[in-house]
Image (spheres, helix red, strand yellow):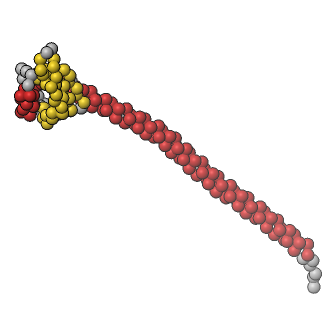
């Protein structure tokens, strides 16, 4: 029988298998590194994309906050202008009240009554004057009560005085002015 020594052949096969395993391990390691790098790159791109979106939202929020501030300023200015407009309208509507009030008092004043002062606070009017008799004061009060513009005539005080050696009655009267849109 022939004897063949298979040890070198087995050793060559073993070295070839070890080399194949090393190459296969290298390919697997390289593939693993490549997959990890690819996944890492993809995740990094997603993070960058989300950061860009977050930055865009932050920028837009800042723009909207500025616009909200401007809107609040505009609303504040609008309220101020409306308040001024209301004041001007009130003044415009009541500018003839003093003239109308004096006209009404002059029309309702009897012949024997003379006024020294007229003071108006709001709708309350305080009249101080002289009358030749108490009857003229009563006539004045009746005239005020019959007027649609003057109401609640209240005689506060009446006293007898001498003016230029003539006996007269000094009176203090309160009346309320009722503002009615008048046709002029």
Q: Can you say which quadrant of the picture contains the N terminus? A: bottom right
Q: Would you place residue 23 above or below residue 122 in this image?
A: below
Residue extending furthest front? Answer: 165
Q: Is residue 51 left or right of residue 8?
A: left
Number of marks drawn: 0
Question: Who is closer to the viewer here, 19 or 168?
Answer: 168
- Which residue does the image show at 16% across and 22% down from the upper left? 161
Comparing 14 with 87, the one in front is 87
Left or right for 182, reference 58:
left
Q: Residue furthest bottom?
A: 1
Whether residue 143 is visible to the viewer of this picture, yes or no, is no
Q: In the picture, residue 82 is in which quadrant? A: top left
The image shows residue 96, relative to residue 35, as above or below, that is above
Residue 140: quadrant of the picture: top left
Nearer-the-camera pick, 127 or 69: 127
Residue 85: x and y, percent?
A: 28, 29
Q: Is residue 119 visible to us here?
A: yes
State the residue at coordinates (9%, 31%): 141
Check the picture and name the quadrant holding the C terminus. top left
Q: Residue at x 73, y 63 (%)?
A: 28
Residue 146 on image: x %, y %: 6, 33
Provide residue 145's location: percent of width, then percent of height: 8, 34
Q: Nearer the viewer, residue 164 or 64?
A: 164
Pinpoint residue 37: horizontal percent, then vertical percent: 68, 55
**Residue at 25% from the left image edge and 30% from the top image edge:** 121
């Amino acid at each position: 029988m022939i004897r063949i020594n298979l040890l070198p052949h087995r050793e060559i096969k073993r070295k070839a298998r070890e080399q194949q395993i090393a190459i296969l391990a290298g390919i697997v390691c390289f593939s693993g590194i490549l997959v990890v790098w690819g996944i890492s790159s993809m995740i990094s791109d997603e993070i960058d994309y989300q950061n860009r979106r977050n930055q865009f939202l932050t920028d837009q929020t800042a723009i909207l906050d500025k616009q909200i501030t401007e809107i609040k300023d505009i609303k504040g200015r609008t309220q101020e202008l409306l308040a001024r407009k209301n004041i001007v309208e009130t003044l415009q509507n009541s500018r003839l009240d003093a003239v109308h009030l004096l006209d009404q008092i002059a029309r309702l004043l009897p012949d024997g009554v003379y006024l020294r002062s007229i003071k108006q606070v709001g709708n309350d009017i305080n009249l101080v004057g002289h009358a030749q008799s108490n009857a003229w004061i009563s006539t004045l009060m009746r005239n005020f009560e019959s007027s649609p513009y003057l109401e609640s005539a209240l005689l506060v005080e009446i006293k007898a005085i001498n003016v230029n050696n003539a006996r007269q009655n000094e009176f203090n009267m309160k009346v309320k002015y009722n503002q009615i849109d008048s046709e002029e």
